[in-house]
Image (cartoon, rainbow, N blue to C red):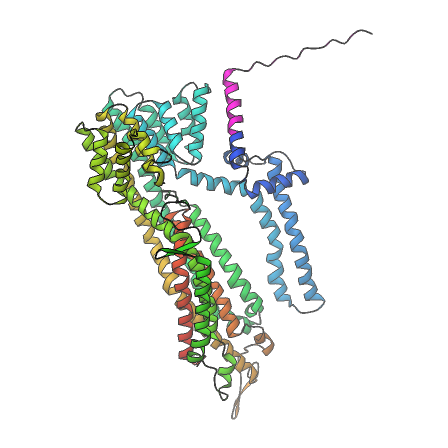
Amino acid sequence: MPRKRRHKKKERIVSPKQYAEAYGSLLQGGQEKRTTGIKEPLYVRFARFAGRIIRAPNKFQKIEYQAALDFLGWDLEPRDVNAAGSLALVLSLLAVVPAAGILLYMTFVTYELSYTMLFYTLGPLVLVPFLVSFYVQNYILFAAKKERMLATSSISDVVNYLTMSMKLSPNLERAISFAAEHATGKIAEELKQLDWEIRTGVHASAEEALDKLAYKWGAYSDEFKHALMLIRSSTIEVDEAKRSLILDKAVSDTLEGIKENMNAYAGEMRQPSIYLYYMGVLLPLLLIILLPIGSIMARLPFSRTPFIILFYNILVPLAVFVFARNIIGKRPPVYTAPEIPDDFPGLPKKGRIRIGKSEVPAVLLGLVAALAIIGLFSLFLDPVLNPYPPEWNVQARENWYPLFSLTGVFLGGAVFSSIVLYSLSHAKRKAQKEIMGMENEFQDSVYLLASRLGENRPVEEAVEYTASFLGDTPLGRFYQRTADNIRNLGMTLDAAFFDPVYGSLKTVPSRLIRGAVRVMVDAMSLGVQQAARALISLSLQIRDSQKVRERIVGILKEITGMMRSIVLFIGPIVLGITTSLQGIVVSTLKRVSETGLAGGTASIPGVNLPMVSFGSPEALAGTPGPMLFMIIMAVFMVELTVLLVYFITRVEEGENNTVLYHELAKTLPIALALFFLSAWFSQSLTGAVI
C-alpha cells in the first residue's frame, strides 16, 4: 500500500505586535484572576452556573450587551448571560406558582380570601418572575453603567497626574506611567495596559495610545477626551510657557466640565427629590388615616393587618430605595474621600469604643445601654405616665397598651445599633476629616515649599521651614516627621516621604498628597528652580480643584437640607401624631358599627334617616389594633430614616460608608425618640392613653 503523505502544518508567523498584544492580555488576565478571583461578583458565579445547566445562544441580540461585558471584563460568555435570565425566570416561577396555588385554594376552596383580595395579590405576584428575569438579563448593563460612573470619578485625578508629569518633563510615555502608578479606578487600569502596550510596541507611539484612550472614554466624558487631546497637543509646543498654558487649560476645562455636570445634576435632582419626599413621607402619612376609612367604607381589604404590613414595611421602603438609587446613580462623581484602614494609628481596635484611656467592646456597651433603657421605660415611665385606665373607662381600657415599654424596646434597639455604628465610624470619621483638612491646607504648604526653594535653599531647609511655619497641626507634624527622617536617619528625600516603615506618608492615606509629593520629589532631580516652578503650578492647580469641590458641596447641601430636616424632625413628629390619630379613627368606626348604626337608620323621633355605611364589624375586626399598628409604624420609621440618611449621605459624600454609619448613629435614636414622644403627647391630649 502506498504511504499516505504527511502534510506539514504551516507555521503561523506571529508579528512582534501580535505577540505583545497576546502576552499583554494573558498577563493582565492572569493578574485579574489572581487579584479578583476570590472577590468574584455573585452574578458572575450565578451566570456561569446557569450556562452549565441551560442551553442558550452564544450571541447577544443587541450590541450594547457585548460592549458592557467587554467593559466590565468579566470572565463570561454570551451564553452565560442569556442563561442567567432564563434560570432566574425558572427559579422565580418555582417560588411564585406554589404561592399562587395557595391563594387560589384559599379563594375557591376554603373561601377565606375574597375575590377582591385575590385580584390585588395574584396580579402583582404573576409579574414577579418576569421582573426578576428582566433584571438579571439586563444586570450587566446596569453594572457597566455604574462602573462607568465610578470610573469617571477619577478623571480629574488622571488629568492632574498627567499634567503634573508633563510640566515636569514633556514626555508622554513618562506621564502615562506616572498617572497609571498614582491614579485608581478603571481608567488607571487602562493606563497601565497602555503603558505596557507602548513598551512592547503594540502602539507606534504614546500619542497613538493616548488617542485610543481619548476616543474610548469620549463617549462617557467629553471633557476628558478634550483634556487628553490638549495634553497630547502640548508635546508639539516648543515654548515652555505656552505649553504650560495648554496644560493648565486641560485641567481647568476638566474642572469646569465637572462643575457643569454637577450643576445640571443638581437642577435635575430637585424635582425627583420632591417626588421622593411625596412617595416616602407625605403619601404614607396621608394613607395612615385615609386607608382604613376608605377601605372600610368601600369594603376593600386594604385596612387588614397583612396588607398594612406589606404596604408600609415592604412596598413603600422598597419603592423609596429603588427611586433613591436611581437618583444617586445619576450623580457625577467628584471627589473620593480618603479611606481610613482599620489599623490606622490612633484608632481603637475594631468593634471597641475608647472611653478615657480604656477601650470597651461596643456590643457589650450597647447591650448594657439597651437593657437600661428598656428597664427605665417599662418599670418607671409606663406606670407613671401611662397607667392602666380605671374600670369605668371601658374605651380607654380597650385602646390601652404599654406604650413606654414598646418605646423602650425600639429605643433600646436603636441605641444599641447606634453604639455599634459609632464604634465603626466615629474614630475613622475623625481621622478622615483630619486627612481632608490636610488636603485643604496642602496647597498653602506647597506654596511655602516653592517660595523657599525659589530662594535656592536646600530642600531639607525648605521642609523644616514649612514644618515650623505650620506649627503643631497635622500637616505641620507631617513635614516635621519628613525633616526628622532626613536629618536624623540620613534618608533621601524620596525615602523620607515614601519609606514603607519610617516614611511620613505611611500614615497619610491621601492620593492627592501622595501624587503631589511624588511630583515634588521627581522635580528635585531637575534642580531646585525647576522644582519651585513645578510646585507653584501644582499649588494653583490644587486650589482650583478645591474651589470647584467647595462649590459643588454647596450646591448639593441646598438640596439635601430639606431632606435632613424631614429625617430629624418633621417626619418623626408628624408620623407619631398621625399614628395615634389612626387608633382614634378606627376605634370610633368600631363603636359606630357595634351600636348598629352601620347600614341602618338613625333613631330620631318621628324621622328615619338612612346612615352612611361604615362597614361591618367583621371588616373592622381585621384592622390592626393600636399596639400592633404602632409597631408597624415604628418599623416603618426605622426603615424611612435609614433610607433617607442613605440618600442624603450618598448625594453629599458619594460612596463613603464611614459617613453613612456615622450619620445613622446620630440620627436613628433621635428620630425614634421624637416619633414615640409625639405619639404619646398626641394620645395624651386626645385621651387615648390617659
Q: Residue at x 33, y 37 (%)?
A: 505
Percent x, y for residue 594?
56, 83
Looking at the image, residue 498 lies above or below residue 357: above
**Res. 299 image quadrant:** bottom right
Q: In the current view of this chain or complex, which residue is farthest to the left?
A: 455
**Res. 359 image quadrant:** bottom left
Nearer the observer, 152 or 162: 162
Indicate left or right for 415 with 114 as reference. Answer: left
Split into 4 quadrants, where in the image is the C terminus?
bottom left
Query: Is residue 24 found inside the magenta-colored segment of the image?
Result: yes
Percent x, y for residue 362?
44, 57
Magenta-tinted stretch: 1-28
Total marks drawn? 0
Looking at the image, residue 198 lies above or below residue 142: above
Q: In the current view of this chain or complex, which residue is farthest to the bottom?
A: 605
Nearer the observer, 173 or 221: 173
Looking at the image, residue 186 lies above or below residue 111: above
Residue 482: tell me if it is visible. Answer: yes
Q: In the current view of this chain or complex, which residue is farthest to the top?
A: 2
Query: Is residue 329 found inside the magenta-colored segment of the image?
Result: no
Percent x, y for residue 149?
43, 41
Looking at the image, residue 661 lies above or below residue 398: above
Q: Which residue is drawn at 72% across and 10% down?
A: 6
Indicate left or right for 205 with 139 as reference. Answer: left
Nearer the observer, 437 or 207: 437
Residue 547: tell me if it is visible. Answer: no
Split into 4 quadrants, where in the image is the N terminus?
top right
**Res. 184 image quadrant:** top left
